[in-house]
């Protein structure tokens, strides 16, 4: 979808985008109609259809915009995490904390798109690209920290550490289809971060 040239059209679509994000946050799924979006945004259905052909296309556009934002934020925050840390263990904890924080802060956005991707291949593919981007940033940060502290870290070990971290974090946050699963014990967020950092560090050290 091309960016509208007129400011009025840009403002109108910004209202639509905000309405969709609110509904995703409130419902936790994509279960809402374009009529609800229209009413919430105070923008006519005709104006919405002037920009997109369907609700599915609207959701894909919103996902693309929001995931572009998340990718940039991940690159900035996770990419800078761990730089100048006192030790490799401290650097690992900073990297884990940065990425986990982004996932937690955006849980209400991510969870509906996890679910929508089950039936929408385009949404699934965009989500996978963002996931791959985040993984690459996380691994580069770990490798850079290892080099800074003269720790031997094979790329395969860094990949496995990410898989362990991501699986545990997504399960704890209840993202998408994993919402049916819950940890055996309820951990406070700071406790979880400490456990995640220690798990990632031990996973790397054991390789």
Image: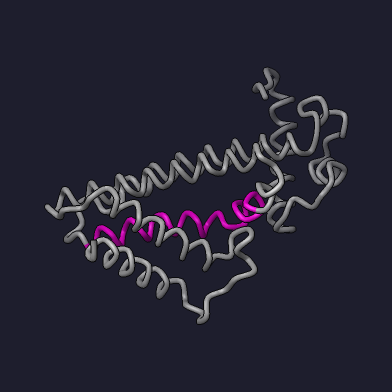
- Number of numbered discs on residues: 0
Quadrant hosting residue 94: bottom left
Residue 29 shown left or right of residue 207 in the figure = right
Coloration mode: one colour
Find residue 53 and report its horizontal and vertical position in percent: 80, 29
Could you say where residue 69 lies in the image, as x and y percent from the top left? 52, 40
Residue at left offset 59%, top offset 36%: 65
**Above/below status of 108 relative to 197:** above
Dividing the picture into quarters, in which one does residue 79 lie?
A: top left
Determine the residue located farthest toward the top in the rendered image. 5
Q: In which quadrant will I find the C terminus?
A: bottom left
Q: Which residues are magenta?
A: 89-114
Does 109 lie within the magenta span? yes
- Residue 107 drawn at (x, y percent): 57, 57
Name the one closer to the observer, 192 or 199: 199
Outermost residue toward the left in this view: 150
Could you tell me which residue is drawn at 30 percent across and 44 percent down? 140
Q: Quadrant of the N terminus?
A: top right
Q: Residue at x 70, y 42 (%)?
A: 120
Residue 141 included in the magenta stretch of the image: no
């Amino acid at each position: 979808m091309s960016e509208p040239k007129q400011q009025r059209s840009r403002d109108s679509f910004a209202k639509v985008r905000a309405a969709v994000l609110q509904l995703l946050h409130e419902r936790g799924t994509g279960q809402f109609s374009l009529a609800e979006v229209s009413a919430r945004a105070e923008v006519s259905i005709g104006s919405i259809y002037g920009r997109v052909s369907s609700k599915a296309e609207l959701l894909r556009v919103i996902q693309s915009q929001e995931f572009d934002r998340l990718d940039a934020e991940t690159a900035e925050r996770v990419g800078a995490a761990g730089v100048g840390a006192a030790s490799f263990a401290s650097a690992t904890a900073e990297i884990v904390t940065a990425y986990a924080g982004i996932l937690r802060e955006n849980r209400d956005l991510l969870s509906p798109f996890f679910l929508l991707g089950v039936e929408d291949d385009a949404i699934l593919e965009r989500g996978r690209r963002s996931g791959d981007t985040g993984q690459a940033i996380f691994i580069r940060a770990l490798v850079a920290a290892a080099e800074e502290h003269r720790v031997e870290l094979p790329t395969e070990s860094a990949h496995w550490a990410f898989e362990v971290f991501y699986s545990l974090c997504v399960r704890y946050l209840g993202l998408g289809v994993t919402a049916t699963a819950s940890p055996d014990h309820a951990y406070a967020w700071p406790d979880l971060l400490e456990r995640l950092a220690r798990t990632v560090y031990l996973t790397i050290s054991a390789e």
